[in-house]
Amino acid sequence: MAIRRFAPMFRQAGISIIEIMITLVLGLFIIGGALYTFLSTRTAFVTNDAIAKIQEDGRMVMERLTREIRQAGFLGCANSLDIPPKILSKTLPPTFAAGDGVRVFNDGTGWTNTTGVARVAGTDVIELKGMSSCTSKLDGNMTADNANIQIVSNPCGWTAGAVLVIADCTSMDIFTATSVSKAAGKDTIAHASDVNIDNKLSKAYGKEAIVFGYGEKSFFVGMHPTLNLPMLYETSYNGTTTTANDVVANVYDLQVLAVRADSNADSAPDVTVTSTGSPPALGGVTWSQALSLQLRFSVRSESDNAGPSSSTYTFNGASVTDKRIKRDFTTVIGIRNRLP
């Protein structure tokens, strides 16, 4: 009978406490490295995202202010400095003055805030005046200087009470429409003397003249009433109503540093005046002589923990310390219809 032989059975050894500790330490090193890499990557992402957003906001502010300031005082073919407008309207705001296309209120001094938005302390206000972007042409020649104005169409939706401008290359009138009606396919604008000083324009305009709305815009830095964030605001006045809209968020400072001006009426800049005090006087130079403005505006990140280290800066009249990333943008903007 055959005898089966079995291999000897050996007792299985367990894992020692030293091996467990070494494994745990190695695991901690691996997890710590992965966590460090994640946090570093996340911090870099937050910082880069904040910088990109600041650059985007700065570009939007630059484009908006540049476009609007270039058009300051623009009243069609006629330049309000060379051809003073005949002001008939009784409803123009008291701040209006012929040729006063741009005004700057240093630290808001002299500026009336008609909005419910609190202006950030220490920031300047830029006020622009001129024509609105919506226009219409005359349907034909006027028969007399006090005749109603017939226009091709009314794409702007003008109604009674709107402050309008009619101009060609030699004359300009600013008046308030007493009625805007449509009859026989034609839109007619009346300019009676009840809301105007006179019902007579400078002349009987021809069909080459253009009618457009008078407009005012102000740009200022204010605190959003619910988000509690500083923003660049724009107020618009169309002759009847004033509206306020936030343009770009996280703009916390706006300064007009200087003006290049023409002091001898030769259409060439011959003096640079630092912006101190309230318009219209800047060291003897009126803002109607301004040819260009030098601006600086500042944008910060929305998160107060986006930067690598803390920094202290002045905001809204107080010293603030946080880790926000901040950038200053400086530019010189020429006023198009003032330059030769």
Image (cartoon, rainbow, N blue to C red):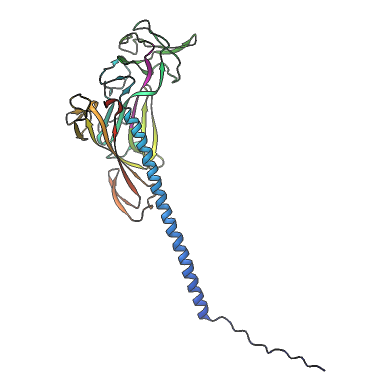
Task: Give the residue at the far right of this rendering.
Answer: 1
Q: Is residue 1 left or right of residue 82?
A: right
Name the main secondary structure of what is drawn in magenta: strand
The image quadrant that residue 115 belongs to is top left
Q: How many marks?
A: 0
Residue 41 higher or lower than 241, as above or below: below
- Viewport quadrant of the C terminus: top left
Mark yes or no: residue 252 visible.
yes
- Viewport quadrant of the N terminus: bottom right
Task: Give the residue at the far top of this rendering.
Answer: 143
Residue 158 placement (x, y as % from top left): 42, 18
Residue 50 higher or lower than 290, as above or below: below
Residue 176 higher or lower than 288, as above or below: above
Residue 302 placement (x, y as % from top left): 39, 47
Assess whether residue 340 is covered by the magenta stretch.
no
Comparing 112 with 23, the one in front is 23
Residue 52 placement (x, y as % from top left): 40, 47
Q: Residue at x 40, y 42 (%)?
A: 56
Comparing 77 with 105, the one in front is 77
Q: Residue at x 44, y 56 (%)?
A: 42
Task: Give the residue at the far front of this rendering.
Answer: 340
The image quadrant that residue 15 belongs to is bottom right
Residue range corresponding to the magenta coloring: 207-218
Residue 37 placement (x, y as % from top left): 45, 61
Assess whether residue 210 is covered by the magenta stretch.
yes
Mark yes or no: residue 114 visible.
no
The image quadrant that residue 279 belongs to is top left
